[in-house]
Amino acid sequence: MYVGADFGAVTTLDPADPNFGAKLLTGVATIYAGIVASDFPRRADAMAQQIVARGPELVALQEVILIRRQSPGDAIVGGTIPATHVELDYLAILLDALECRGGHYAVVSQVQDIDVEVPLVTGPLAFDDLRFTDGDVILMRTDLPPGHLRTTNPQAGNFMARIPLPIGVDVLRGWCSVDVRVRGRRFRFINTHLEGNLPPPFPDIQGIQAAELLAGPANTTLPVILGGDFNSDANGNYGPAVYSLLTSLGGFTDAWSVARPTDPGLTWGHDEFLANPSLAFIFRLDLVLFRAGGFDATDAEVVNPMIGSSPPLWFSDHAGVFVTLAIR
């Protein structure tokens, strides 16, 4: 769904830098300005339009952000009172947009990932706190015939492999899942967002998270559908080890490769401001994989509509991926 800004201005700071505090305040202000400018309510309406037009029974969402504010804040002086006033709730905004467009969806599983609170300058010696909470969510259609689609056993977890940030918290990533019954057939639907492919000296956190995924929710006798942002290019140009791990040792089949074997299916590459004048994708990071269960990938589509042209605005830095799986 994309928060609307690049957090690198904060996550790469060095606490030993004598200007750490000033850089943190500048970075937070820049991030928040980017989020506001990215106009998520408008982007959410474009997402809802694409979802309703295709009517998927299950939807896997990543980077589902909740932003809360405390005014005045206390983080600047080391306070620990959590911000509670909701500033932007990306999930609620999307669900409202879906309903306005005639879509009927409900949350059936979700996981909370990183939850961090930082100071925001609001004036001379005046500060609020901004609290950013990330998560991943599975939605299910609720307007299908009775008994057509049922879900049970919602589960969620955070990976043990994670990146520590200089501001004293870890970058949590996670997964959520639900067991699904469709016309008498059962399978597990898993949604995840893996860490990016980090350069040395960082360890292979992304690969460890993928291994945790295989040993955890994907370790089941049920057939599995696994969707998400894997931060691993299926075409081998960025972090290819995870894609290879999932499709070899993990035993998963890539739905896109079955349905569109000659199409590169690129899904990522817009700049942080979503202001590319044309599509600029370079990697296929967003995947729907399946294992066992007699599934057959009959169709797949990448969508990322431009929702404004002056200036340009895309609905996310990633494309949406729609896949049709038939059950034999």
Image: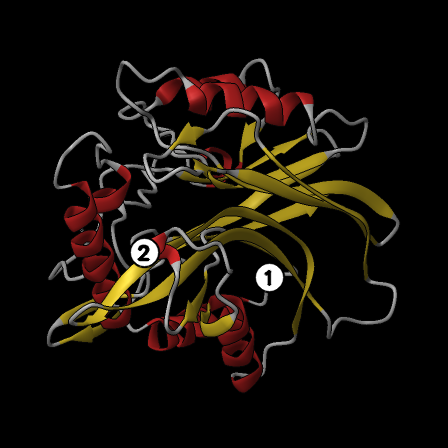
In this view of the protein, which residue sits in the foreground, 190 or 166? 166
In terms of sequence position, does the residue under pointer 2 or pointer 1 come before the other? 1
On screen, residue 64 versus residue 120, left or right, reads right
Q: Would residue 328 be seen by someone viewing this image from the given angle?
A: no
Residue found 73% across the figure and 75% down from its top: 143
Q: Residues within 10 Å of mark 2 (few under 14, many from 20)?
A: some
On screen, residue 239 versus residue 99, left or right, reads left
Residue found 34% across the figure and 37% down from its top: 284
Number of dots carrying numbers: 2
Residue found 68% across the figure and 38% down from its top: 295
Between tags 2 and 1, which lies in front? 2
Q: Residues within 10 Å of mark 1 (few under 14, many from 20)?
A: some
Quadrant of residue 38 within the rendered picture? bottom left
Label annotation for residue 48: none
Type of the residue with mark 2: Ile
Mark 2, secondary structure of its residue? helix
Mark-to-mark CA distance, 2 and 1: 45 Å
Q: Position of residue 163 (x, y in %)?
A: 41, 29
Residue found 36% across the figure and 32% down from its top: 196
Pointer 2 residue: 76
In this view of the protein, which residue sits in the foreground, 166 or 73? 73
Up/down of 38 relative to 189, above or below: below
On screen, residue 328 versus residue 199, left or right, reads right
